[in-house]
Image (cartoon, rainbow, N blue to C red):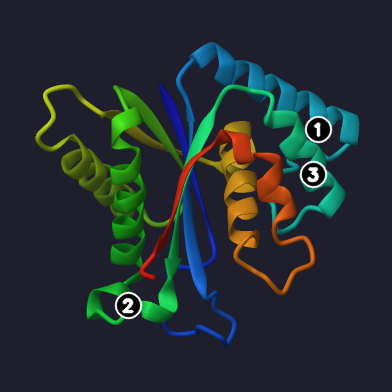
Amino acid sequence: MLVFVDESGDPGLLKIGCGGSKYFVVTLVIFEDKEEAEAADRRIELFKKKLSVPPKFEFHFHENKPETRKRFLRMVSRFSFFYFSIVINKTKLYGEGFKDKNFFYKYTSRLVFENAKPYLRNAKVVFDKSGSKTFRGELSRYLKEKINENHTDRLIKKVKMEKSHSNNLIQLADMVCGAVFRSYNLTKIDWREYRNIIKHREIYVQFWPK
């Protein structure tokens, strides 16, 4: 089992409404079958060639044009993956701990993995490689400890970090996460359009706290 993780918005409480996002979203894209993940990877690479983009081009929801977003999501929605997201309503968070971005990110990641527990088994989890080496190590240990706790079978086997520009499936997680994030921005005309394309791949999106 392969799990690809990405986020949208920023994990900070200090600039809400002044450049900071109201929501912070973390998404897990889960492939139960390695061959299906590899097929999706190849299809994304082929799509890049059709678009004639530079070698280091990445699919980023917030940077891509609307038509590219829709074409990408329609294309990948044919593959057998499913996803979980958690949408953090930062306006309702008051604890001092949430002001620490590293704590906030780890805690949010734990919440979405808790929701996905019934579907996880011996999973290899891949995050976008960002933050310090120390934080990446802390995140890996934290998730394996919290999610595997009280389970005889390992739900998470391994956590690793890879650069998104070299991993098409992290880019897939970015696009799915961006679609979920956009669906909560009701000021946008297309707020529901992208998430509707991949709705049949959605298991659970939690909005917290209400």
Q: Earlier in the sequence, mark 2 or mark 3?
A: 3
Sort mark 2 into few (<14), some (14-19) or many (20+) by Cα contacts within 10 Å.
some
Q: Position of residue 150 (x, y in %)?
A: 9, 35
Query: Where 174 falls versus 209 (above or below)?
Result: above
As rendered, which of 207 and 147 lies closer to the eye?
A: 207
> How many numbered marks does the figure carry?
3
Q: Earlier in the sequence, mark 3 or mark 1?
A: 1
The residue that label 1 is drawn on is: 48
Left or right of 207? Residue 22 is right
Which label sits in the foreground, 3 or 1?
3
Mark 1: amino acid: Lys
Sort mark 1 into few (<14), some (14-19) or many (20+) by Cα contacts within 10 Å.
some
- Alpha carbon separation for disc pair 2 and 1: 39 Å
As rendered, which of 130 and 12 lies closer to the eye?
A: 12
Left or right of 45? Residue 181 is left
**Label number found at residue 190:** none
- Alpha carbon separation for disc pair 2 and 3: 35 Å
As rendered, which of 152 and 194 lies closer to the eye?
A: 194
Mark 3: amino acid: Lys
Q: Earlier in the sequence, mark 2 or mark 1?
A: 1
Q: Quadrant of the C terminus?
A: bottom left
Q: Position of residue 134 (x, y in %)?
A: 29, 53
Question: On the image, which quarter does residue 90 sit in?
Answer: bottom left
Residue plotted at (31% across, 52% down)? 111
Query: Where 190 falls versus 186 (above or below)?
Result: above
Mark 2: amino acid: Lys
The residue that label 2 is drawn on is: 99
Residue 162: in sight, yes or no? yes
**Label number found at residue 70:** 3
Residue plotted at (72% across, 38% down)? 73
Q: Position of residue 108 (x, y in %)?
A: 35, 58
Q: Is the Cβ of the residue at disc 3 closer than 8 Å to that at disc 1?
A: no
